[in-house]
Image (spheres, rainbow, N blue to C red):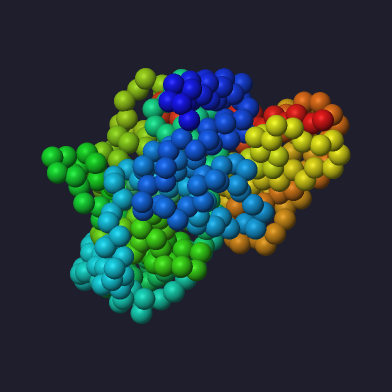
Amino acid sequence: MNRAIDVRRRQLLLSSAGAAAAAGLGGLTTDALAQKEKPLPGYAAFKDASRVIVHSTNTIETKRSAFGTSVVVPEDILYVRNNLPAPDSMIVADRDAWAVSIEGVRNPRKVTVGELKTMGIETVAMVLQCSGNGRGFFSHKASGTQWTVGAAGCLFWSGVPVAAVAKAMGGVADGAKFITGTGGETIPPGLDPKKVMVERSVPLKAMDVALLAWEMNGDPISVAHGGPLRLILPGYFGVNNVKYLNRLAFTEKETNANIQASGYRVRDIGKKGMPDQPSMWEMNVKSWINNPSGSESSIRAGMVQIHGVAFAGMRAIRRVDVSVDGGKSWNEAQLVGPDLGPYAWRQFVYPVRLKAGSHTLVSRATDADGNQQPMERTENHRGYAHNGWRDHGVKVSVS
Ligand SMILES: Nc1nc2c(c(=O)[nH]1)N[C@H]1C(S)=C(S)[C@@H](COP(=O)(O)O)O[C@H]1N2
Ligand SMILES: [Mo]
């Protein structure tokens, strides 16, 4: 394509996406940005380019229209978020030889993945979701990737329970209050490790469900998604699920790495990140519609199977309601497919006859504790944890 036209088309796409975000028309945003602007990076070359949005070398989003109804998200459309360049594929050349240092236990030492595989096996289905999923709907230009709905996926993970590893090493040392995981990326030369390293701490109680995982959806974990070994913390936001894990420590304090101390902190717009602000730990109740996705130029009048996903971090989903009039009236949707436990998402379907015209479709989930998605987002500096139902709606034209 002619370069000038390409640039112009890009500007148009960006401005229409911005307008759509401001108007709360989620589906338009996701798939308007879906034009293939950037090629897939090498470590993620296996992704299905037509069903993802490549924001940058380190950030790839699933298109809203790509989410299916079989609960689990296939790896070739799963989002990617790397804070540092992805490691070389050599990192998975000898998976069982990868070593992780276990600290803050009575008998600390290094263990290999090969040995971890002898210590126990558990499998969990859980939603992996970036803290900034939905950031694209904020209107204050929050810095970071402008994700709409596709920085999330429901996945199976297999590995050894963290509790079993701690037990095998004599138990957690006295005074430990946090689980701290460190990513094994090579820090680019000239950068201060504390400023860029991926090291996260979560409350010790997460140990009840945490895994050291080597398998995702039945395959050894790819480099894109954290192989050879990943810390899996069901119910917690994506950032805590440290990839390329090379250190697991039971600590008295949270790490002072920037990504914990000032990063991933919820604060008012314009405020700096500080350790006393809430950290992006447990996920909140959320849902969105995937079909129709809003990217169709128009859909045919008649029966439509509106479907989407709902989850609530540590809690199960009690019900999902759908509205086809922008939230004026609500109807209970059916939960479909197998229930894979509280950390997985439930898929919902609402069959409805739509007449010709324009319709705004929205969904609203309620979790087992009675928490319900709010209508509006909670404004915050970095655009985290957006679960407001209005912005996530899709506008469809029926003819
Ligand atoms: N080592 C390491 N772990 C990491 C990251 C990273 O950059 N390095 N990114 C985190 C963030 S912010 C998210 S949202 C998820 C993304 O996981 P995915 O790329 O497998 O989808 O991994 C988390 N774990
Ligand atoms: Mo993230």
Residue at 27% across, 56% down: 88
Residue at 51% across, 44% down: 52
Compared across the picture, whether 332 is left or right of 375 comes to right
Residue at 39% across, 38% down: 56
Residue 380 in view? no
Position of residue 348 measured from the top left corner of the image (x, y, whole percent): 71, 49
Position of residue 252 measured from the top left corner of the image (x, y, whole percent): 26, 52
Residue 145 in view? yes
Position of residue 269 measured from the top left corner of the image (x, y, whole percent): 41, 21
Most foreground residue, 375 or 154: 154
Compared across the picture, whether 13 is left or right of 101 comes to right
Most foreground residue, 362 or 54: 54
Position of residue 398 measured from the top left corner of the image (x, y, whole percent): 79, 31
The image quadrant that residue 87 belongs to is bottom left
Vertical placement of 179 versus 92: above or below? above
Which residue lies most toward the left here? 190
Compared across the picture, whether 255 is left or right of 341 comes to left
Vertical placement of 259 versus 232: above or below? above
Vertical placement of 224 versus 329: above or below? below
